[in-house]
Image (spheres, rainbow, N blue to C red):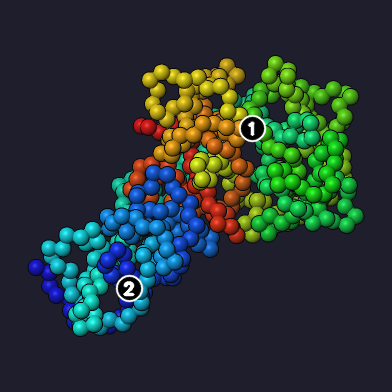
Amino acid sequence: MAEPVAGARADGQLVTFAVGDEEYGFDIMAVQEIIRPPALARVPGAPPCVDGIANLRGVTLPVVDVRTRFGLPRAPDTDRTRVLVVEHGGRRTGLRVDHVRQVTRVTGTAWEPPPAVLAHAAADCLEGVVKLDEGRRLVFALRADRLGEFTSGDAVADGTPAAARRAAGATGGPAAATDTTALVTVQLGGGEYAFPMERVREILRAEPPTPLPDAPPAVLGVVTVRGEVLPVIDTARALGAGAHDGRLRDDQRIVVADVGGTALGFVVDRVHEVLAVAAAAITPPPAVAGAGAAVAGLVQLDEGRRVVLVVAVDRLVAEHGLAALAGERAAAPEAAAARGGTAGGAEQFVTFLVGEEEFAVPIGQVREIDRCQRVTDVPGAPPHVRGVTNLRGEIVPVVDARATLGLPPQAPDERSRILILDAGGDALGVLVDAVREVRALPSGQLQPRPPQLDSAADARRVVAIGVVPGRDRMLLVVEAAAFAGAGA
């Protein structure tokens, strides 16, 4: 029989709260803050009691539903629902409770050990029983560290993409052939153009730029991206394909390209896809090409029915007197890196939607992005395998990201795309609901996967969490191997 602990503790304070019909409490020193239920990113395959991941002022916060943790039915949020933020071992966890009751002072003599015969779902977290109001009120005192604790024998201590690749012995880049070139294809007016992927840092939603006095005609103005000033170029005007009136549409994008070690933003009407083409397939432009030296070459696709003009970024900048803009920004790349900009220390990701959540895969693992073309069924294939597709003579298996992540099926639509990923040297197609953008994340915005997800094999597909500053937006970072091993 356990020795009584009554009288063995110093006086202290408990934060008491209700879960179902019972009252529980935490030592006040374990509670960092109490918040209303935050917006959550749901992690497919997470343990049932993990509601999701919240962005708490730039820190990833796994939120555990205490009801589900104790085996009680889940209850909808009410005006009284709260999340207790506790910290253990330098990591924070949010614990969702029905309501917080009070902070009460407890004497050491009010504590008793938990009954040895207690068969309660909270028994593994129970620190003791506190008698209040002359014994008429019982509060189950819990250990906050154990309540939010989930263990797994193969937990990853460092959940960043680089660490996951090191653990797998991978280099992080595709085993692409040296005679291929990756192109980001875009729409400008009635024509299709492409930027070399190696020059593209990220792709942003278009925001109204602030005009610059006495700027060259092709400069629309500047926008601020993570504290850095980004000049924005009217790409259509620069290429002789029309001109904007300065008012950008919500569906337009800004392709941020590297120019002499710094960045310039190029406005495009739409971003189509990422293509991997043979270097020999890029032919010189005709001498009468209207864009002149700003076009490096052209690619003919679909048996010549589709022509893509490849933008010569450096020549375009020089032709329109934009080199000074790039030079000004290049003057202090170290300062930009120190502030977390894209000038250094950042990793690029292709972000995509599956259901209501946003995922990200390192851009080095993306060979290309294709429209949802014909996929041929394979009889007897596992449920998560959509079939195979013919990618310029290469047979590529296609898996459904929804099925892989345990989400309900959905018929592909005009937004659906197939990510062609490099999975250990083999091409793998992943059908996703939509591709959103290319985003650069400094290392400070990548946080390890919360340990609460380690106990569920499906949730371990998420190797890190990308936190987008200033927004309730988080990216669930996965790698190609997460889809290659699906169903195994």
Q: Using a 10 Å C-alpha cutoff, classify the residue at mark 2 as few (fewer than 14 neighbours), some (14 to 19) or many (20 or more).
A: many
Alpha carbon separation for disc pair 1 and 2: 54 Å
Q: Quadrant of residue 33?
A: bottom left
Q: Is there a contact, CB below 8 Å, between mark 1 and mark 2?
A: no
- The image position of residue 12, as x and y in percent, is 30, 80
Q: Which amino acid does label 1 sit on?
A: Val
Residue occupying the point 82% across, 39% down:
236
Residue 235 shown left or right of residue 459 in the figure: right
SS at mark 1 in the image = strand
Q: Which quarter of the rendering shows the N terminus?
A: bottom left
Name which of mark 1 and mark 2 comes first in the sequence: 2
- The image position of residue 435, as x and y in percent, is 59, 39
Q: Which quarter of the rendering shows the C terminus?
A: top left
Labelled disc at residue 16? 2
- Name the residue beneath numbered marker 1: 274
Whether residue 278 is visible here, answered yes or no, is yes
Q: Is residue 436 above or below residue 131?
A: above
SS at mark 2 in the image = strand
Q: Using a 10 Å C-alpha cutoff, classify the residue at mark 1 as few (fewer than 14 neighbours), some (14 to 19) or many (20 or more).
A: many
Q: Which amino acid does label 2 sit on?
A: Thr
Whether residue 282 is visible here, answered yes or no, is no
